[in-house]
Amino acid sequence: MKDPGVQHPILFLLLSVIYHVHQLLLLVRLSASALAHNLDPFKAANRFPSPPSSLFPSTTMADSGEAPAAVEHLNIKVTDNNNEVFFKIKRTTQLKKLMDAFCERQGKQPSTVRFLFDGTRVRPEDTPDTLEMADGDTLEVHQEQIGG
């Protein structure tokens, strides 16, 4: 008996094209969701850990010889008991966007979790600048506990 792929090469080709278009559409949806939250779509995919920051210089020297500019984006790790998700976010973006994106990704309601940075609760209106966060810092996510 012949291989079905040999008997029907056009069907095989069509299925291959459908599969690849489906994968592309998933990537586009993920990218659109990440961009809607002002996040880097490649970091939001969380396929691989962040590369060492030493590979990508974060400051540049202006042609006029001015001091290096401040890093505009930070890589932030968000962890809960079972997950680590990496986000790339602007220093001036409210952390609400990151918090909402993490909750959406994990299937949690934002009202049921608390985000902590260095043991202090993070408010949605906080930014990496207001919390004096550095590249590679971690936000911890804890389940809200109600009661006494």
Image: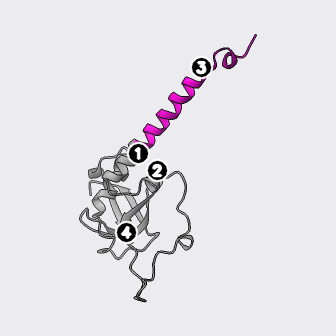
Q: Amino acid under label 3?
A: Ile
Q: Do callouts 2 and 1 mark residues in contact (Cβ within 8 Å)?
A: yes
- Residue 141, compared with residue 21, is above or below; it is below
Instruction: Say which residue label 4 marks.
Output: 117
Mark 3, mark 2: which one is toward the viewer? 3
Q: Amino acid under label 4?
A: Phe
Q: Position of residue 63 (x, y in %)?
A: 43, 84
- For this orientation, the residue located farthest to the right is 1
Mark on residue 104?
none
Residue 144 visible in image: no
Q: Secondary structure at mark 4?
A: strand
**Separation of marks 3 and 2 at Cα, in angstroms:** 33 Å
Q: Do callouts 1 and 4 mark residues in contact (Cβ within 8 Å)?
A: no
**Separation of marks 3 and 4 at Cα, in angstroms:** 55 Å
> What stretch of residues is rendered in magenta?
1-28
Q: Amino acid under label 2?
A: Ala
Residue lying at 27% horizontally and 64% vertically, measured from the top left? 94
Q: Is residue 141 magenta?
A: no
Helix, strand or loop: magenta stretch: helix
Instruction: Say which residue label 3 marks.
Output: 10
Q: Which mark sits nearer the N-terminus, 4 or 2? A: 2
Mark 3, mark 1: which one is toward the viewer? 3
Instruction: Say which residue label 1 marks.
Output: 30
Q: Which mark sits nearer the N-terminus, 3 or 1? A: 3
Q: Position of residue 2 (x, y in %)?
A: 74, 13
Chosen colour scheme: one colour
Q: Is residue 59 left or right of residue 16?
A: left
Q: Which mark sits nearer the N-terminus, 2 or 1? A: 1
Residue lying at 28% horizontally and 59% vertically, measured from the top left? 96
